[in-house]
Amino acid sequence: MENQVILNSKQFELTINRLCHQLIETHGDFSSTVLIGLQPRGIHVLKRLKSRLEIILGKEITCGNLDITFYRDDFRRREKPIIPSTTNINFSIENKNIVLIDDVLFTGRTIRSGLDALLAYGRPNRVELLTMIDRRFRRHLPIQADYVGKTVDSMISERVAVEWKEIEGEDKVLLLYTVEGNG
């Protein structure tokens, strides 16, 4: 089977814009809300949202990056070790509304790790989840997103890839089919 484009570049841009407007509906001027992207791929979603929100609102939005490496439940189980990134949260999260951001929600384990890592920085008022793609039906943990760019129903043998023009040359989301034995 051929890989399938789930979102092309135009749909991708519309999805980012819609997510921004949904965030504004809930958080207004973001005076008590901060956006935090999960390393590594949630950072790309965060950057795009931040850029667009700042254009729409005409003000700077407080954002941070969160490295969840040491909070992962598979950290010591991998043959190839995970290389930690840099956490960049140089503000207090006490009593703030947090929007945790990642590119793909699948099993929920990355988000669980993100919540554990986040609580090491304080006690937020509320935590919401924004994900570009929600792969339903495969959760290992009872986690759901508050803001979803696109919901994708896929088989376990398929993979979803969010590609960015800054990295892969074009904004798009792909459903990748793996060949039996090569997955």
Image (tube, helix red, strand yellow):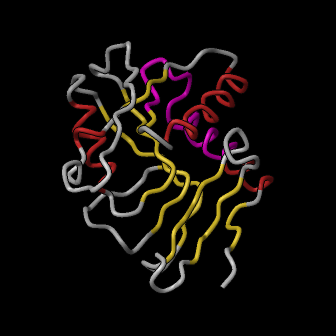
Task: Tell me the quarter of the picture where residue 156 sits.
Answer: bottom left
- Let me know if residue 29 is in the magenta part: yes
The residue that appears at 50% across and 43% down in the rendered structure is: 41
Instruction: Work out whether residue 91 or residue 95 is closer to the camera in this orientation and state it.
Output: 91
Task: Tell me the quarter of the picture where residue 82 sits.
Answer: top left
Residue furthest to the right: 10
Residue 177 x/y as whole percent: 58, 77
The residue that appears at 53% across and 58% down in the rendered structure is: 133
Residue 78 x/y as whole percent: 26, 55
Instruction: Work out whether residue 151 or residue 169 is closer to the camera in this orientation and state it.
Output: 169
Residue furthest to the front: 79
Q: From the viewer's perspective, is 152 left or right of 121?
A: right
Placement of 49 over or under 88, stated as above or below: below
* Badge count: 0
The residue that appears at 40% across and 20% down in the rendered structure is: 88
Give the magenta part as a residue range: 16-36
- Let me know if residue 164 is in the magenta part: no
Instruction: Work out whether residue 118 or residue 148 is closer to the camera in this orientation and state it.
Output: 118
The residue that appears at 54% across and 83% down in the rendered structure is: 179
Q: From the viewer's perspective, is 92 left or right of 123?
A: right
